Amino acid sequence: QVQLVESGGGLVQPGESLRLSCKARGFIFKFLTMDWYRQVPGKQRELVANITSGGSTNYADSVKGRFTISRDNARRTVDLQMNSLKSEDTAVYYCNVYTANRDYWGQGTQVTVSS
């Protein structure tokens, strides 16, 4: 059974940092691309960053230079280091994997950036 569990969200001030982590179970982690998405109420879920099995990364323009995605295949985790956070980064962040012909999502973790 595929399971994704996010952690690390919280309340921070603008300019501060947070590190999100997603623990994966139930599939062959090292072979699959892993994604981080985020969603604010009333808007579509948007892709923040992803990392392929080979370690290639892709970022939304809005987070380039501030966020870094990484993976640890031995620990089956994918992390999102978020620096220089802005109020517009406030959202629920979700870990995602596409496998067995469908998307799987974690429960989400809230990130709030506010002074």
Image (cartoon, rainbow, N blue to C red):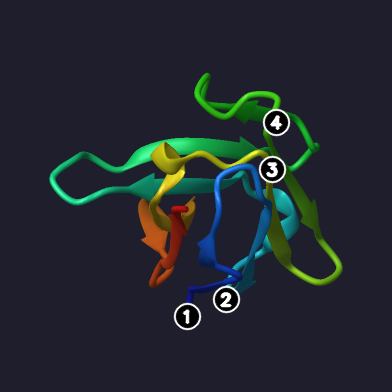
> Which residue type carries mark 4?
Thr
Identify the residue at image location x=55%, y=54%: 13
> Which residue type carries mark 2?
Gly
Mark positioned earlier in the residue sequence (2 or 3):
2
- The residue at which mark 4 appears reads as 57
Local secondary structure at mark 2 = loop
> Which residue type carries mark 1?
Gln
Q: CA distance from mark 2 to mark 4?
A: 23 Å
Local secondary structure at mark 3 = loop
Q: CA distance from mark 1 to mark 4?
A: 26 Å
Mark positioned earlier in the residue sequence (1 or 4):
1
Local secondary structure at mark 1 = loop
- The residue lying toward the viewer, choosing from 112 and 4, is 112
Q: Is residue 33 left or right of residue 87?
A: right
Mark positioned earlier in the residue sequence (2 or 4):
2
What is the crowding at mark 2: few (fewer than 14 residues within 10 Å), some, or many (at least 20)? few
Residue 1's label in the rendered image is 1
Could you tell me if the residues under marks 1 and 4 are in contact, i.e. CB atoms within 8 Å? no
- The residue at which mark 3 appears reads as 83
Q: CA distance from mark 3 to mark 1?
A: 33 Å
Of badges 2 and 4, nearer the viewer stands: 4
Q: In the current view of this chain or complex, which residue is farthest to the left?
A: 42
Of badges 1 and 4, nearer the viewer stands: 4
Of badges 3 and 1, nearer the viewer stands: 3
